[in-house]
Amino acid sequence: MKILIRGAGEIASGVAHRLWRCGFSNILLTEIQIPLAVRRKVSFSEAVFDGSATVEGLEAIRVQRMDELFPIWQRGGIAVIVDPLCQCIGEFNPDIVVDAILAKRKMGNLKLDSWLMIALGPGFEAGHDCHCVIETNRGHDLGRLITKGTTSVNTGMPGSIMGQTHSRVLRAPTQGLLETSRQICDRVDNGSVIAHVGGIPVHAQTDGILRGLLRPGYVIGKHAKIGDIDPRSDINYCHTISDKARSIGGSVLEAILANRSGNRY
């Protein structure tokens, strides 16, 4: 069984890791040319830059062609390919497609075909754009499988950690070049300068550990998320899959197994 996952950021990587752990090892993730994953230590998208990326013991290798996949799978790894429009889908011919871009809106026009189509978050309607959609908003319904209709709308509210929501998220004050000498895992203080965007400083609004940070050297848009401060200050959280990603990964697994058992959507 071959699985195609659109996106290779934090949530997509959590999904891939969960499926691989459960024996679904023939996995290919697609990415854009310059990925914008903030939690880079737990994102397979880093393979686009470095050729490979390892998350909790699972290695993803960047590939250029479909004939490179089987040797990687045989060695126990998974694969990442730069393919923003998912043009490889015809040649790859997956059994399952998971749209994990989390753009909060539908990107592209993948039609329901012979594969099982699972989508994550807002922008999809189960039964129309996909066979089922999974709730990604934190709260009581996180991870819920929806087989008719849509998830909740995008609230724009970051998940609360120790009472911190917007204050723990670093955003670009303007469009411009991102510059920083900070590293993921750095301890930061409220008010300290974390980065500059277009020459304008970006200040921390809480104390904690820098759990995520975009790669510097790229022009980013105004209000784009560039970093994530964890007020719990546990450095181990920088290197491990989040509770949210694990929950959503478990829901994707549920969707696959429910379909295989005959509970079709």
Image: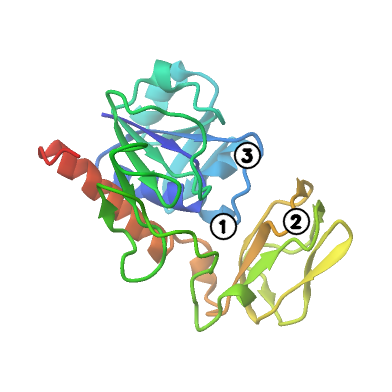
| Position of residue 163 in the picture relative to residue 254 (left or right) | right
Residue 34's quadrant in the figure? Answer: top right
Residues under numbered marks 1 and 2 in contact, where contact means CB atoms less than 8 Å apart: no
How packed mark 3 is, by other alpha carbons closer than 10 Å (few <14, some 14-19, many 20 or more), is: few
Secondary structure, mark 2, is: loop
- Residue wearing tag 2: 222
Residue 187 lies, with reference to residue 93, above or below; the image says below
Residue 36 picture location, percent across and down: 63, 48
Image position, residue 79 (x, y; %): 45, 33
- Characterize the local packing of mark 2: few (<14), some (14-19) or many (20 or more) Cα atoms within 10 angstroms: some
> Which numbered disc, 1 or 2, marks the residue that appears first in the sequence?
1
Q: Name the residue under label 1.
A: 39
Tell me: 191 left or right of 75.
Answer: right
Residue 230: % across, % down: 56, 74
Q: Depth check: 214 or 150 in front?
A: 150
Q: Distance between the residues labelled 1 and 3?
A: 15 Å
| CB within 8 Å, label 3 to label 2 | no
Q: Is residue 22 visible?
A: no
Q: Do the residues labelled 1 and 3 touch (CB within 8 Å)?
A: no
Q: Which numbered disc, 1 or 2, marks the residue closer to the eye?
A: 2
Q: Is residue 26 above or below residue 203?
A: above
Q: Nearer the viewer, mark 1 or mark 3?
A: 1
The kind of residue tagged 3 is Asp
- What is the number of the mark on residue 50? 3
Q: Which amino acid does label 1 sit on?
A: Arg
Question: Marks 1 and 2, how far apart in space?
Answer: 19 Å
Mark toward the start of the polypeptide (3 vs 2): 3
Q: Which of marks 1 and 3 is nearer the N terminus?
A: 1
Residue 190 left/right relative to 22: right
